[in-house]
């Protein structure tokens, strides 16, 4: 049997505890590995110094938070078997590590917000993320204006001129 070299893999977290009596385990991982965990078909578990593959059942991941997931492995059917995994490290091949999708919104501070209909609205002074919903805080005629953002609203992004043009919803700006 061929062993998997640790140098080809990256440790992403560890198995914290069992979940239920049917062999499920809770994997705690670093938050930046969330997309890698989501895409994984199996994890390597370090047992007796060797990395052993454990394959995930179809629909075998249930996310609890941005840093933990309940895993149901094909081979693990009992709580007793699952307890052997507790405290062990979880690994993925380095080539399976998925970068977080790039969100260009993080670089938009200081950009001028332009509405497709009204023209220049004002500079983006702050950005907030409310449970995945991006909101720009824009200075509009000396007043604070909160502008919700999603990519469907995007008309044009001009990085050279530091301008973003959106199709703003009706009624957002009065007057």
Image (cartoon, rainbow, N blue to C red):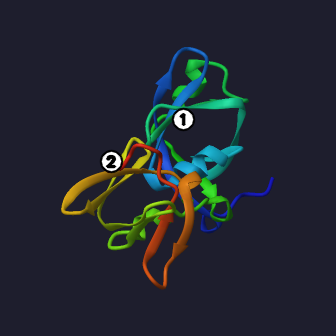
Kindly identify the residue that appears in the image at 69 percent across and 29 percent down: 59
Residue 174, which numbered label? Answer: 2
Q: Nearer the viewer, residue 45 or 132?
A: 132
Separation (CA) of disc 1 from disc 2: 59 Å
Whether pointer 1 and pointer 2 mark residues with C-beta atoms closer than 8 Å, the reply is no
Q: Is residue 15 above or below residue 80?
A: below
Q: Nearer the viewer, residue 106 or 8?
A: 106
Kindly identify the residue that appears in the image at 45 percent across and 63 percent down: 105
Q: Is residue 85 above or below residue 103?
A: above
Residue picked out by circle 1: 85
**Outermost residue toward the left in this view:** 142
Q: Nearer the viewer, residue 32 or 168?
A: 168
Q: Residues within 10 Å of mark 1 (few under 14, many from 20)?
A: many
Lateral position of residue 120 relative to residue 45, left or right: left
The x and y percentages for residue 57 are 72, 31
Kindly identify the residue that appears in the image at 47 percent across and 69 percent down: 164
Lateral position of residue 31 relative to residue 101, left or right: left
The x and y percentages for residue 168 are 47, 52
**Outermost residue toward the bottom in this view:** 160
Tag 1 secondary structure: loop
Whichever of labels 1 and 2 marks the residue nearer the N terminus, that label is 1
Q: Residues within 10 Å of mark 2 (few under 14, many from 20)?
A: few
Q: Is residue 95 visible?
A: yes
The x and y percentages for residue 132 are 44, 45
Q: Nearer the viewer, residue 123 or 51?
A: 123
The x and y percentages for residue 56 are 69, 36
């Amino acid at each position: 049997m061929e062993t998997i070299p640790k140098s080809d893999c990256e440790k992403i977290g560890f198995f914290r505890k069992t979940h239920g009596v049917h062999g499920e385990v809770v994997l705690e991982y670093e938050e930046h590995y969330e997309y890698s965990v989501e895409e994984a078909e199996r994890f390597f578990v370090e047992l007796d110094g060797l990395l052993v593959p454990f394959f995930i059942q179809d629909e075998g991941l249930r996310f609890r938070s941005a840093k933990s997931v309940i895993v149901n492995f094909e081979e693990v059917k009992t709580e007793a078997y699952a307890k052997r995994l507790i405290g062990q490290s979880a690994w993925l091949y380095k080539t399976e590590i998925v970068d977080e999708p790039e969100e260009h919104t993080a670089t938009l501070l200081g950009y001028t917000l332009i509405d497709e209909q009204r023209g220049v609205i004002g500079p983006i002074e702050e950005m907030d993320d409310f449970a995945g919903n991006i909101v720009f805080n824009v200075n509009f005629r000396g007043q604070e204006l909160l502008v919700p953002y999603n990519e469907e609203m995007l008309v044009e992004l001009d990085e050279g001129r530091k301008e973003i043009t959106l199709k703003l919803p009706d009624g957002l700006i009065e007057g």
